Amino acid sequence: MKTATLAAIAAAALLAGATGEAAAVVRVRSFLEPGVVRLGEPARYRGEILFTRGELSRPQWIRPDSTGAFAWGPMITSLSRGVGARGVDTLRLLTTVQAFELGSVAVPGVAFVDAATAVPSPQRLPGATLRVVSILTPADSNAQLRPVRGPIAAPWWERVPWLFVVLGLIAVAVVIALVRRMRRKEQRPALAPVAPRVVHDPAALARARLAKLRARHLPEDGAFGEHALELTAILRRYLEAAVTAGPQGDTTSELSERLQGTALRTTDVAEIAELLQRWDRVKFARVVPTVQEAHRHERDVEAFIERHSGPVAKKEAA
């Protein structure tokens, strides 16, 4: 059903009384359709203002209040120009209205003002009547309404945001991999540079050790045991490197037996055995030599090295 309400404003304020020119607003009208709606159902509301061009500079609609029994929708406006310099222009309004009272409801007209005036004076479109009926039909008057119930929840696997779960697991895996890689780099020992093999002359090495021993002046400090231990080590290392080339750690007797099968003479082997046995007694504090005897032992080692450094084949030091 369509209800159209048309009202005209027959007289309006005249310009400068004596001029007798036409009124600013020619007429206003409003349309409401459909005329019968159900409770809360929106009805289309259209309004028009016809005014002489130049008399209304900036006509504007005033949005009605949506509180109470009415709810208004968004307002869509348009303006169409008339013909001629003093033609009649038309300002249109299109919106919706919802009524929440049953029966015949008077819908007030939408107000408008001329925003160009110093003190705008609101004017209204003509009102309209809207008939609001119940949602239930007469056949449903005895219907028993069920109570309001909440919606059934979706299963848990549909509520889980799987995309974010997968992205989170990937991020955790990447972090764990980076941490493990950093720990491996920290725990990995740095490879020491490989030093080239240096072949030493056993005789030169023995002389250097003997010079360092003399510079310590152990006999003058009374450290005869340490002095004898150093002399034993110097002579043993020289023999193991230049003569026997055997394993280290032999006792004095074992070393003497291995020297028997070398290029050394029997007297040299006996001299070596005597020196080693004498130093063993000093090391175990069975004999306390004098400072002069300790220095003579140094000279004996040096003399032995000088005698045998030439004919004995030079081998790599241990």
Image (tube, helix red, strand yellow):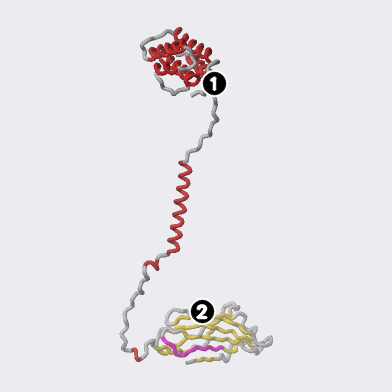
Instruction: Look at the picture and state if 132 lies above or below 204.
Output: below
Q: Which residue is mark 1?
A: 201
Query: Which quadrant holds residue 86?
Result: bottom right
Find residue 34 and report its horizontal and vertical position in percent.
48, 89
Pick the front one: 88 or 145: 145
* Relative to 303, 256 lies left or right: left
Q: Residues within 10 Å of mark 2 (few under 14, many from 20)?
A: few
> What residue is drawn where x is 45% and y is 80%?
71
Check residue 74 in the rendering and tell me which mark sits there, or answer none: 2
Q: Is residue 35 magenta?
A: yes
3D distance between C-alphas at marks 2 and 1: 107 Å
Across the whole image, how many numbered discs are drawn on residues?
2
The answer, for residue 220, to whether it is visible in the render is: no
- Reply above or below: 243 against 129: above
In the displayed structure, 97 sits above or below 202; it is below
Q: Which residues are magenta?
A: 28-38
Percent from the top left, x then y, of residue 217?
Answer: 47, 13
Q: Tell me the residue at 44%/90% (across/down).
A: 36
x then y, percent, for residue 265:
48, 12
Q: Nearer the viewer, mark 2 or mark 1?
A: 1
